[in-house]
Image (cartoon, helix red, strand yellow):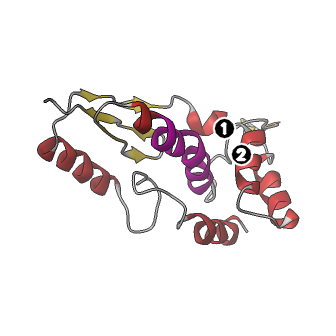
Amino acid sequence: MQKALNEILIVIYEPEFLDCSYGFRPGRSCHDALKEVAKILETKKVSYVVDADIKGFFDNVDHGWMMKFLKDRIQDPNLLRLIQRFLKAGVIEEGVEHETDTGTPQGGVISPTLANVYLHYVLDLWFTVKIKRECRGKAYLIRYADDCAPRRSVQVA
């Protein structure tokens, strides 16, 4: 069921995702992300490089925000309810079931796509709309899942 739902989400969101996003996307790999980083470093004047990893990202995705982001593109209440159920499915550790109020399904096929949806709104659009506009010079973001490398180049007169 998750696989079928994941395929639907890919069809809906793949055209929306920005070019800076590489993780868990069709036709994109970590090697492609690294090539893009190398290309920027080799061809642009780069003054700053920030390498970031969102610690515990997959375990801490806020379900409320996730559902708000999904509702931006999905109007079908049945599809949204099904996604909500996957998010709330819980985790079994050492035979004990634990409720999940945050995070994406542990080991779930749908988790990487949900992560990309969340980071599309929280990181990619934020960087593109807010940060790039406020930087002097050029700014670039390369993201592979919850790892990212924003770069800032400054034009020197």
Q: Are marks 2 and 1 in contact (CB under 8 Å)?
A: yes
Q: Quadrant of residue 83?
A: bottom right
Residue 132 showing in the rendered view: yes
Q: Quadrant of residue 98?
A: top right
Q: Is residue 124 above or below residue 82?
A: above
Q: Quadrant of residue 58?
A: top right
In the shown orientation, is residue 11 left or right of residue 92? left
In the shown orientation, is residue 82 left or right of residue 47? right
In the shown orientation, is residue 5 left or right of residue 98? left
Q: Quadrant of the N terminus?
A: bottom right
Which of the two labelled residues, at mark 2 and mark 1, occupies the earlier sequence position? 1
Q: Amino acid at mark 2?
A: Met
Dot 2 corresponds to which residue? 66
Image position, residue 77 (x, y; %): 87, 63
Q: Residues within 10 Å of mark 1 (few under 14, many from 20)?
A: some
Magenta segment's dominant SS is helix
Image position, residue 36 (x, y; %): 25, 51
Write the residue at 72% across / 35% down.
Answer: 94
Instruction: Tell whether position 124 is magenta.
Output: yes
Dot 1 corresponds to which residue? 61
Q: Which residues are magenta?
A: 111-130
Q: Amino acid at mark 1?
A: Val
Q: Nearer the viewer, residue 132 or 4?
A: 132
Q: Residues within 10 Å of mark 2 (few under 14, many from 20)?
A: many
Q: Quadrant of the C terminus?
A: top left
Write the residue at 75% across / 63% down.
Answer: 74
Mark 2 or 1: in front is 2
Residue 107 showing in the rendered view: no
Image position, residue 81 (x, y; %): 85, 58
